[in-house]
Image (cartoon, rainbow, N blue to C red):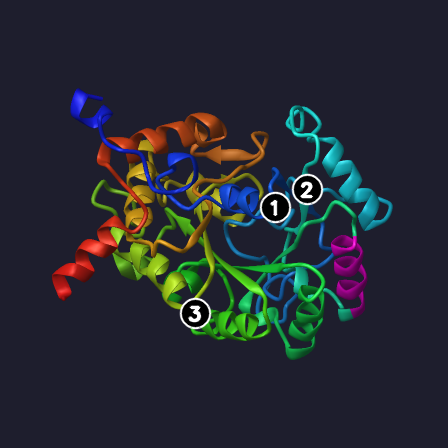
Amino acid sequence: MNGNEDSRPAGPYAGGARYNKTGDVLKAKYGTKVYRLALSSGATCPNRDGKCGTGGCLFCSPAGSGDFAESGGGSVTEAIDRAAALLKNKLKGCPAPLFIPYFQDFSATYAPLAVQRERFTEAISHPLAAELSVATRPDCLPDEVIELLAGLARLKPVTVELGLQTRDDCVAAFMNRGYPSNLFPEAVAKLKAAGIQTVGHMIVGLPCPPQYGSSPDGFPLRTQSRDEILDTANFITASGADGIKIHLLHVLEGTPLAEMYKKGLFRTLSLEEYAGLVCDIIENLPEETVVHRITGDAPKSILLSPRWSADKKKVLNFINREMERRGVVQGSRRRELMNVQE
């Protein structure tokens, strides 16, 4: 970086951050560090069991994107205690941490209602649980599930993370997502009316179906463009979702996407490309949107591509340096466009 870039002011968020980090939001709310504990939901998905498809999303691992979720025998309480114990090194210097039990794998609200009630209630009742977080799909939220979550939200805050991945229904169908995008804002509206916080999950780097044309660099399938990616981010925030998760496309062994990759049908993004797209998303977000993630983890043992993503610390540092270099602050580009329109 040159001298001018070093002199750029830091962002307006906690600690001079350039975007509204969920960790900072939680620490300001509770006065201590809050850690998310990934738990197994005991559910599957409607695009796996035949209700709307089989095989799951093309990118989803056999563990249903819950490769780090704590599972095994025992109660939910025991699973929380085991997951918390794994964080003991991170907890040094934090005498009174709190936790968010996070039912991560598959579609957590697709389990039988009685199972959901038992597992979610036990999790939110844990003495160190500050909140409850549940990952699911917009088509897995019948009225009785929302009623259950609303009741729990009267005890402690509840967040529902909705896997959108892309706003483009053709790309979503190609990925075997199994539901139309219009269900996403409908689900957000229902959840918010019930007092439940919402987060939209998007993936950067998805390949497009053949009818979208080939990649300029010779691959049969092109990757979603910057404008298409920004359209998904805008769709999430326009729905009224409280937060957003930005995730890199991982190609994992044991998935249909891995077989496509091995055949040379598409390529994955470079670190430089991904960092640039994250910056584009951040500067176009509303200032109040909470950013829950700007990259993601994948088990190194099954990560096929991109291999650079295995070093999460390096990725985060690179993205943060790129934000500094570009002078990115959450919402800055959005404000510029609004001022031009006025």
**Crowding at label 2, few (<14), some or many (≥20) Cα neighbours within 10 Å?**
many
Where is mark 3, residue-wise? 181
Specify start and end residues of the magenta stretch as a single range: 114-125
Q: Give the residue type at disc 3.
A: Ser
Between marks 2 and 3 in the image, the one whose residue lies nearer the viewer = 2
x and y percent of residue 240 in the render? 43, 67
**Residue at disc 1, secondary structure:** helix
Q: Quadrant of residue 72?
A: top right
What secondary structure is found at the residue carrying circle 3?
loop
Observer-nearest of 84 and 219 = 84
Q: Amino acid at mark 1?
A: Tyr
Give yes or no for residue 310 being in the magenta stretch. no
The answer to whether residue 302 is left or right of residue 294 is right
Q: Quadrant of the C terminus?
A: bottom left
Picture residue at 36% right of the left edge, 57% below the top: 233
Inspect the image, locate mark 2, and give the three-letter code of the amino acid beneath it. Leu
Judging by the rendered image, the residue that carries numbered circle 2 is 98
Dots 1, 2 in contact, CB < 8 A:
yes
Marks 2,3: beta carbons within 8 A: no
Residue extending furthest toward the right: 74
